[in-house]
Image (cartoon, helix red, strand yellow):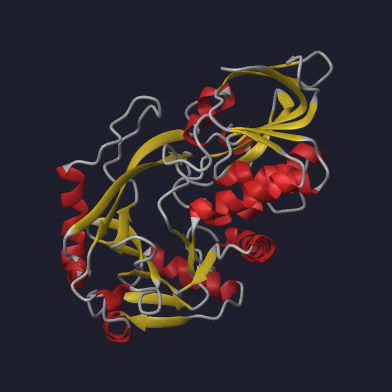
Amino acid sequence: MSSSDERRDVIVVGVGGMGSATAYHLANRGADVLGLERFDVPHTQGSSHGITRIIRRAYYEHPSYIPLIERAYELWDDLADETGRPVIHRTGSIDAAPQGNEVFEGSRRSCEEHDIPHEVLTGAELNERFPGYSLPDDYRAVYQEDGGFVVPEQSIVGHTEAAQAAGAEIRAREGVYDWAPTPDGGVRVWTDKDTYEADRLVLAAGAWNYKLADALSGLAVPERQVLAWFQPETPSLFDPDSLPVWNIEVPEGRFYGLPIYDVPGFKLGKYHHLDESVDPDDYDTDPGPQDEVLLRDFTEKYFPDAAGPTMRLATCMFTNSPDEHFILDRLPDHPQVVVGAGFSGHGFKFATVIGEILADLAADGDTDHPIGMFRLDRFE
């Protein structure tokens, strides 16, 4: 163990979206927390960057997410109040697709089952109300006025600063390369700078998690993702007051996007972009012409007024589980180790509540949140 540091209650590996929230919740409970981040806080190497991230109450992925998203909204508002950082912005949200498609039907079902106020619009009605859209007239859309976006970098800074204020120690540019259980049921963690011990360990290292836990091999698979920002011909149609965030299923695939905010351009991406599973330490981080063309072709067809000059392209990573649902659990052979993984491109909006869940699992061994569908044993 490091000669300069006593044993901690909890070490959190990764201080991105999930790890910073976990450190915050643990420190607020009085735990002695050490957060270790191999890059900067915040950084652009993983999954928790990109200026804006969608948040929405309507959830076509599965109605079981609704109780978690309700709690996430509460916690995002609490973080904004505590830190004075406007981390959540409500613009409304759209889930649109041909009638009968799961993006539309699942979103509508989740609203109906959980009494979430919403409207059902045709494509023609959507285009008229929000002229930035140009969907086929016979498409169907769920509009939910409480959707919007979270600002990831500011969220990480807010969680980190609040964790530090509560007593957590956060160390950036210190990479964890191994850990092992100790005979007394704790953990020893080796970094490229020091060695530490703690009673509990939380692995929140995003795309690198599978390299730190054999149990995640094949279950938390990194995937290269590309985002684009295009400058609209009429920017006012694409500002946060005029354009709800959106998820749209079209014959070309499932795409998502957000209004102009903080940087020039209308932002969009395609789920599972080019279906490229990658090693997070060795992949092409530089977007190329193929990436841009895929996103521009979609924009020209469905948001033609937004298909102006390219302002920015950026890569990030999804980490996909086999069923594209989260992994939130303790390791079966090492119950003192908690993992949060496999967020599959739709996890950041839940970062606040995931931090609360991971803190519960680390501090108490269980949580009152409904996470049965996210346990590791579902893959056995």
Answer with the quarter of the image where residue 332 lies: top right
Q: Residue at x 20, y 60 (%)?
A: 298
**Residue drawn at 45 percent across, 74 percent down:** 91
Please tell me whether residue 365 is drawn above or below residue 305 in the rendered image: above
Q: Which residue is nearer to you in this view: 252 or 350?
A: 350
In depth, the one of 202 and 320 nearer the eye is: 202
Q: Is residue 151 above or below residue 56?
A: above
In the image, residue 100 above or below residue 154: below
Instruction: Tell me what residue is drawn at x 78 percent, y 28 percent.
Output: 8
Please tell me in which quadrant of the rendered image residue 222 appears: top left
Q: Is 341 left, or right, of 8 in this rendering?
A: left
Q: The N terminus lies in which quarter of the figure?
A: top right
Q: Nearer the viewer, residue 268 or 166?
A: 166
**Position of residue 305 measured from the top left corner of the image (x, y, whole percent):** 19, 72
Q: Is residue 290 visible?
A: yes
Quarter of the view holding residue 20: top right
Answer left or right for 10 relative to 258.
right
Question: Which quarter of the figure is the C terminus placed in?
Answer: top right
Percent from the top left, x then y, of residue 160?
Answer: 63, 46
Residue 98 vs residue 86: left or right? left
Q: Residue 348 location in percent, x, y?
A: 52, 52
Residue 158 horizontal side relative to residue 119, left or right: right
Residue 63, position as x, y percentages in the image: 57, 62
* Number of marks in the rendered image: 0
At x 43%, y 69%, the residue is 105
209 or 288, which is in the foreground?
Answer: 288
